Amino acid sequence: MKESLNKTTFKDIKKGDAVNLERALSLDKRLDGHIVQGHVDSLGKIIEIKNIDNFVEYKISINEDSLKEVVYKGSIAIDGISLTVSQVTDTYFKVSIIPTTINNTNLKSKKVGDLVNVETDIIGKYIFKYLNKSEDKEKIDMNFLKENGFY
């Protein structure tokens, strides 16, 4: 689809390039891991790769709108690989990846400066949307939480 080509790294893919494929989640089984839909929200740029003991840390910058949906210890998908966010700042996020994941995905060929497809967590997207709904509707704040027994 044109939108997929415009919003992903797939426009630059060549025959023989590695891609990651993962089977869809089956909701009749026990839910374990992250909920990833296979959509690409934005392109990210790898700005640092650091080997640390028994894992590799990737620092990735993405656009401001998508970064708002990234949550520390939340789910994120990089090139279709479901990962956990290990740090978030105002300009980038980090993921820490074990060797098994790197060796079995296209991450082993990624370098600083490479673009990656990023999907933020669907639950985080819905919460962000709900918290930022229009002014004519009730906002969630400390009073709302107290009045509804959450605080």
Image: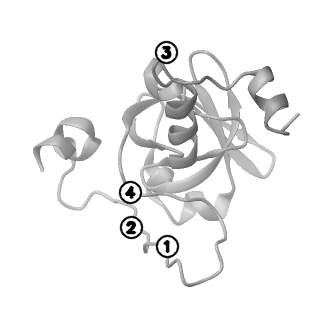
**Residue at the image position 65 percent from the left and 35 percent from the top:** 71
Q: CA distance from mark 2 to mark 4?
A: 10 Å
Query: Residue 109 at what x, y percent from top left?
Result: 44, 49
Which numbered disc flags the more N-terminal residue, 3 or 4? 4
Q: Residue at x 80, y 22 (%)?
A: 142
Residue 38 numbered tag: 4
In the rendered image, which residue does mark 2 sit on? 21
Give the CA separation, mark 1 to mark 2: 12 Å
Q: Label 3 neighbourhood size at 10 Å, few (<14), some (14-19), many (20+)?
A: few
Question: Label 1, on which residue?
Answer: 25
Closer-to-camera residue (126/33): 126
The alpha-carbon separation of the residues under discs 1 and 4 comes to 11 Å
Q: Is residue 90 above or below residue 84?
A: above
List x then y, in percent, for residue 32.
67, 70
Q: In which image quadrant can residue 20 be found?
A: bottom left
Of mark 3 and mark 1, the one earlier in the sequence is 1
Q: Nearer the viewer, residue 30 or 96?
A: 30
